[in-house]
Amino acid sequence: MLWYKGWLETRFKALFAFMYAVFPVVFLPLTERNLAPASHPAMPALQHTIGFLGFYWAAFGPPMMLAGSGIKTQTLRSQRGVHSSMLYTLSLPVSRLRLFLTRAGLGFGELAAVLLIAPLGILVIFPTMRPNVTPRDLFEYWIAALACGIFFCSVGVLFSTFLDDLTQNWSSMAASIFFWWALTNSHVPAPLDIFNVIGANAPLFTHSLPWAQMGVAIAAAAILCTAAFTIVRAREY
Amino acid sequence: MNELVIETHELRKSFKGQPALAGLNLQVPAGSIFGFLGRNGAGKTTTIKTLIGLLRPDSGDARVFGLMPGDSSAGILIRRRIGYVAEDKELYPYMTVAQIIRFTRGFFPRWRDDLEQRYLKMFELPLNRKIPDLSKGTRSKLVLLLAICRGADLLILDEPSDGLDPVSVRDMLRELVALAGSEAITIFFSSHQLEEVEQIADSVCIIDRGAAVVAGSLDDMKTQYQRLRVVFGEQLPAGIRWGEGADYVRQEGRTVEILATHNVEDILNQARSVPGASVERFPVTLKDIFLETVRSN
């Protein structure tokens, strides 16, 4: 029943996130019709563009959905007034761990669905790439984008434990941009550059999964979620 | 002696250095209707939140069904046997009446379909209407339904009649009495409506500044407590010290009002021994007890 509740809370905003993710797929082809094929000398530019798109999808989908969860209700942070239905949830015979896992799990699930747009969108935006990528490449790109997105989603989950709805939403986006800027403008070891898995090092180009970066992204997400749950478990309502 | 459903011992809780509970001792017998009274900010809601595990006490001990609500797994067991109505009665704004009933039912294997149908009809709840579209009174009725139908052994109700019209209040009180009688449910409820509490409670606790100032059976209290009015002749005798039991004394001119908690006859005799004094005694109401104890505290 908690999944049902979570879906009712987030369905419209998940739709909003979906539309947000579709936006470049609809509009970019109108302006980027002549983008180079993957084998063209302009390859680095293409990789950069795809990296930016991947970042857009993976980093901004989660805040959009988290914003949706937050606007409708609060499952992590109690607020007075319209959001105080939290007390009703906490009066149910469920553990805070279950509440937390349901909330985070639903967010990750919706993220996975929204990120399906990424591999499909790449083919729409860059039709010249079609001959060079296989369905397996697209699937692996989705997996890589998901690992990266889970990291951003976890940033939002952590923020939602101590920030109000609006602040949490903008802070998640700002944190995403900051991480992206910091990692792309510093010479971090390759396994730590988790954005690279949706950019130059994406499976679309390398034809293999970037296990190291994915592992780092998921480990970082696990740390963030553990911190978030520690806050939720200790919180008094 | 009755089994205790709720028991607290020297319960203490502070918020930012301000004590909300200051050594609260509480004993709620199984099967009782227990009125929990106090002024705004006296510590009622803090107590209730502690009992269902939403707050952790700084010190002291709280037990519900013999279990500690602060413990995660015990808290789940406790909440499985509790119907809770929060003070603000907020529900999920994106659900309809039917959806929240279906949602809540899923957590309680002992959900009472018979009571659900009964209250849906009695409260005339519109199943397809969204919760924000309900009036405050209708939302209060829905919250009551959701608490009662859980098949709970203990109902914890924080201001349950808030927002209800007089007819609904009367119906609710009747139902609570019936539930306590026929289903052996313990009802622990806080209220500012002293008349309501007096109508149905068999035990009460008056809390002030985070501690119980009066607690016990309401019938015993009404028997033991007496209000005395002593009017002296020309002048109040100097240095009069009332006997044991005259716990709450107020003086206005030549008139002294005494709320005697026990030893009433001795206090009466003491007053009558003063030449020219006239003495009247009155039965007390819960309101008298509440006002005097809280005022004196």
Image (tube, grey):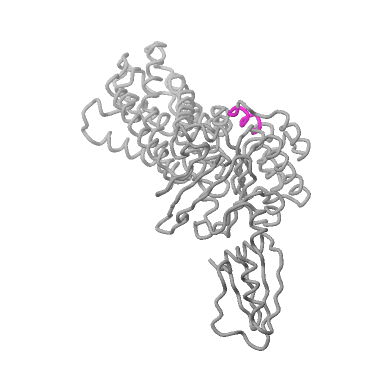
Side of B131 where B120 appears, left or right: right
Q: Is residue B117 visible?
A: yes
Q: Residue at x 40, y 43 (%)?
A: A171
* Residue B84 in the image: above or below residue A15: below
Write the start and end of the magenta stretch as one range: B100-108
Give the image quarter of residue A129.
Answer: top left
Q: Nearer the viewer, residue B240 or B189?
A: B240
Q: Foreground residue, A208 or B285?
A: B285
x, y percentage for residue A27? 49, 29
The N terminus of chain B, quarter of image: top right
Residue A163 rendering spot, x and y as whole percentages:
43, 45
Residue drawn at (42%, 21%) of the image: A126
User: What is the magenta segment's predominant secondary structure?
Assistant: helix
Can you tell which quarter of the image residue A54 is in? top left
Residue at the location (36% across, 18% down)? A37
In the image, residue B273 above or below residue B198? below
Instruction: Tell me what residue is drawn at x 69 percent, y 61 percent.
Output: B285
B5 on left or right of B140: left
Q: Nearer the viewer, residue B125 or B59?
A: B59
Q: Is residue A118 left or right of residue A214?
A: right
Q: Position of residue B265 (x, y in %)?
A: 65, 68
Q: Is residue B285 magenta?
A: no
Can residue B103 be found in the magenta stretch? yes
Percent position (x, y) of residue A124? 47, 20
The answer to whether residue A42 is seen in the rendering is: no
The total number of labels drawn is: 0
